[in-house]
Image (cartoon, rainbow, N blue to C red):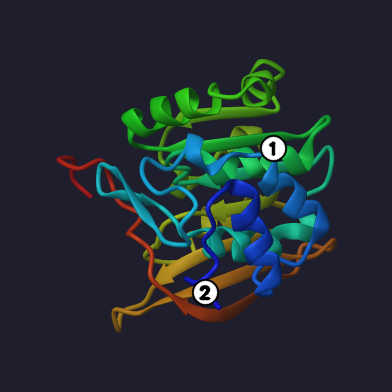
Amino acid sequence: MAWRSGGSTNTSLIDNLLRNGLLNSPSLAAAFKSVDRAHYAPTDPYADSPQSIGYRATISAPHMHANAAEALLPYLKPGGKVLDVGSGSGYLTRVFAEMVKPGGKVVGVDHIGELVEMSIQNTRKSEEGAALMVSSVLRFLKGDGRIGLKEEGPWDAIHVGAAAKGLHEELVEQLAKPGRLFVPVEEESGGQWIWVVDKDASGKVTRKREYGVRYVPLTDHPGERT
């Protein structure tokens, strides 16, 4: 029941995602409930729909964030390392930080500097979010996430929050052993599909095409060349 899980409060939104089978993990549900989406979505934050955050970017619908987090769940553990590419308003990045604390590290990367600053300010709206940044569990950086962040890898989980032109082998290379990449890919036909890329303990990589989606493209800052 995608698109029908909105609520009047953050808690009711997450409860509806649980009720409709779009969110299944109790630990993820607790993490989502602890992060008020109103701090990251500019209008109607508890609707199950994507919203513009400016700069040709959006915050995805809650059910899509739930799908992504569920897909990465085996790698979202205390002490884990997560890279969030195209972190936008910082919402899902913050949820990931809830899952890997204590001792973990989550880095949100966006090449739009204004969105990086927005995500920092959004996260500071709660004492808990501010504390995660002070402790360096959570950081936001300006950069080209399409090439990853090799110097701080390998990453247990990599999430891409916008439609890429391909699987970006740089990101696959930066996965830990084991590790998982969740990425929407825009195909030549014009459609978009979620791909889940796994690297096992021996380094073997498997790629699986999942389901059709509709994300904004993973592009340069408006006004810059792609």
For mark 1, give the secondary structure. helix
Q: Residue 97 got which mark?
A: 1
Q: Residue 98 falls in which quadrant of the image?
A: top right
**Which residue corresponds to the image point at 72% horizontal and 45% vertical from the top-left?**
31
Q: Name the quarter where the N terminus is drawn.
A: bottom right
Residue furthest to the top in view is 134
**Which residue corresponds to the image point at 48% horizontal and 29% vertical from the top-left?**
122
The image shows residue 127 at horizontal and vertical percentages of 65, 20
**Which residue corresponds to the image point at 46% horizontal and 44% vertical from the top-left?**
145
Q: Residue 115 got which mark?
A: none
- Pick whichever, 124 or 210, lies toward us: 124
Q: Is residue 60 left or right of residue 92?
A: left
Q: Is residue 102 above or below residue 9?
A: above
The image shows residue 197 at horizontal and vertical percentages of 63, 68
The image shows residue 70 at horizontal and vertical percentages of 70, 63
Give the Cα distance between marks 2 and 1: 25 Å
* Residue under label 2: 2
Ranked by sequence position, the earlier of labels 2 and 1 is: 2
- Pick whichever, 112 or 37, lies toward us: 37
For mark 2, give the secondary structure. loop
Q: Residue 189 falls in which quadrant of the image?
A: bottom left
User: Is residue 140 at all visible to an observer of this figure?
Assistant: yes
Circle 1: residue type? Ala
Which of label 2 and label 1 is nearer to you? 2
Q: Is residue 125 above or below residue 89?
A: above
Q: Is residue 26 left or right of residue 144?
A: right
Residue furthest to the bottom in view is 189
Mark 2–mark 1 CB contact (< 8 Å): no
